[in-house]
Amino acid sequence: MDAACMRLSGGLDSLWMLSAGGTTVDAPGSHPSAAGGVTTPPAVALVDVRKTFGEVVAVEGLSLEVKAGEFFTMLGPSGSGKTTTLRVIAGFELADSGRVHLHGVDVTRSPPYEREVNTVFQDYALFPHMDVLENVAYGLRVKGVSKRERRERASEALEMVRLPNVESRRPIQLSGGQRQRVALARALVNRPRVLLLDEPLGALDLKLRQAMQLELKSIQRELSEHITFIYVTHDQDEALTMSDRIAVFSDGRIEQVGTPGDVYERPANEFVAGFVGTSNIFEQHGRTYTVRPEKIRLLADTDTDVPGAAGIVRDVAYLGSVTRYVVELDRGETLVVVRQNLDMSAEQALAERGRRVRLAWREQDAKVLQTNQQEVERQ
Amino acid sequence: MIGSGRWSRIAFAVWAALIMLFLFFPIVIIMLYAFNPSNVQSWPLSGLSTRWFSSTWHNTEVRQALWLSLRAGLLATGVAMLLGTMAAFAVDRFRFFGREAVSLVLVLPIALPGIITGMALNSFISFNSLTFSLLTIVIGHATFCIVTVYNNVLARLRRTQSSLVEASMDLGADGWQTFRYVTLPMIATALVAGGLLAFALSFDEIVVTTFTAGAQNTLPIWIFAHIRNGQQLPQVNVVVLFVILVSLLPVALAQRLTRDTGVLRSGRGAPAPGPARATAAPAIGAGAAP
């Protein structure tokens, strides 16, 4: 980003004006927001990245392309390598091998301060000895932006995250949600081309988290012409809510990359099926299938005109809007069924425990799972 | 149970008061003697006077000793702040072979009797035919001053979020800017507190100084010499009063500085309460020994 462009300020649109110098190339691509047929290279491209910590392999053979303007989520359990991947992109960790490209530029060996990415940290990492405005303006200050301009831009960024009137407070005087917004403003004020978010909502309570999810998504939509979001989380609901695409991580590898619909409705393997949603796995005709709990119909035992599997309700959990039934089939498997409490009271739902039932689902809702990729590779 | 009854509580209170009296009464007496109008030490004082203050101030020996003590203290403190901080960073940030050993080596000089450090330095200086000078005093003092800075800074670093440095780098600050704008402000109070303690240690040190000063007199050595030969006792009392004040003030200041200032790790919610206050005290620890 060149200096002249950094100094532009004004409304939101100009706030996000970014230099395109040296990064636009004529290459076929499919990014929807790329105007005029000229497309940009992927915002982030990882090629065969490997990172170890001592004996522990954190990430192995990882390749990934994130399109410009995307809300891309790296989803996985802790220790699956998603945060390491984020840190490799940010430059906090250097890959042992493999390449890291940002907008077509190889930054594999560049230090963090030379990369046009900014990070929202899990613990926010606000500078405790600076007030909110100084925190937000920090990136501009170290780049030598004039005092007046950085005040203006920091204020704008705080307005954007809807946090005015706290400029002169210290981080310690803010609530968790407010700190989270300051951290976001502090990153956004630098007009990064890629914004990295490391479980930024992890420390917030559920209501606040859900509100922030929507807000983050709307900020991203507003800025998607200029900025790519890469989001790390272990929360599948969060991933499904916000993402354009999701990469599901396990054991330092990517199990599947796809839209929320892809990974939820067409999970590539058993791990994805289990991690993104409830894994309802059963064997039939020598193949492994999965079917989502809400796609299963819970029928009375007497309802034999529909083909289905008979079983017994072993457990019932009443969850307010829905009820979850654990059904043990006569042929051995246990499936989870979720049913909306349309005309079912809590008492009625709980009374289902121990009843004999029949389960049925549409054929297209049972997905064939690939054999676990890792198992194939290990053999 | 011990201490549960009313009488035993009173007994404990009296016992504690007696101990405090035993510890501090002599110091109070010495401080009072500085105001003794007579040149003979007798009790009770025949009145209060500041006549010895002026004569002490005009004593060139005292002035030279004071000047030497100040220079030695400031230089040793400077060396300690530099080396102690660097050592603290090394131990906090990096894992390397001998990391624990570094900690031990730094703490050892205050655990070892000063006389051993003193003799060792003395034979080293003589063996290498170096001249005893301000420099040799500074080296001697630095050996036990480093640890106060090291301990304070290390304690602060351990309570500081490591992600702050990453955040700074992430926002475009290079290594120097990060140190200047983030790291240094974070450790500033701990660093100053460590420095103040180091100065206080150096200013009243006598054992190591005896072996490294050669023919020069620092203030404590001057006091020691004149108490032994019994001359100029009134002036000695004035100097002692001064040394007590100069040693106490930095310690008190250091205590204040290392209190929780809100600069410390804020965690997820409220400021960390308890442990923040504990830094200054353990940092002095055995430091009073030499």
Image (tube, coloured by chain):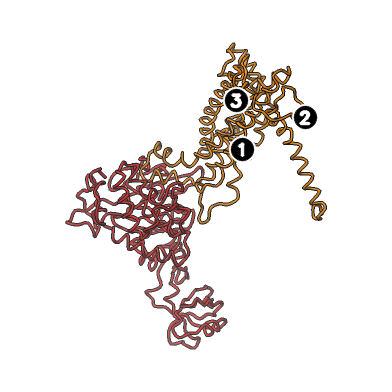
| Foreground disc of the pair 2, 1 | 2
Tint applied to chain B in the drawing: orange
**Apparent side of residue A126 relative to residue A45 in the rendered image (left or right):** right
Q: Can you tell which quarter of the image residue A114 is in?
A: top left
Which kind of residue does numbered mark 3 sit on? His
Measured as percent of width and height from the top left, residue B183 is found at 46, 40
Amino acid type of the residue tagged 1 in the rendering: Ala
Helix, strand or loop at mark 1: helix
Does label 1 lie on the same chain as label 2?
yes
The residues tagged by marks 2 and 1 sit, at their Cα atoms, a distance apart of: 38 Å
Single out the residue that lies furthest toward the front: B47
Q: Against B12, is B121 above or below?
A: above
Q: Residue at x 59, y 34 (%)?
A: B197
- Near mark 2 (Cα within 10 A), the count class, few <14, some 14-19 or many ≥20, is few
Give the CA distance from mark 3 to mark 2.
Answer: 37 Å
Q: Which residue is mark 3?
A: B141
| Mark 1 / mark 3, whichever is N-terminal | 3
The residue labelled by disc 2 is B43
- The N terminus of chain A: image quadrant: top left
Chain letter for red? A
Residue B73 shows in this picture: yes
- The location of residue A117, given as percent across then percent down, is 34, 48
Residue B283's disc is: 1
User: Which quadrant of the view contains residue A115?
Assistant: top left
> Label 3 lies in what chain?
B
Taking depth in this image into account, of B132 and B163 the one nearest to the observer is B132
Q: Nearer the viewer, residue B88 or A307?
A: B88
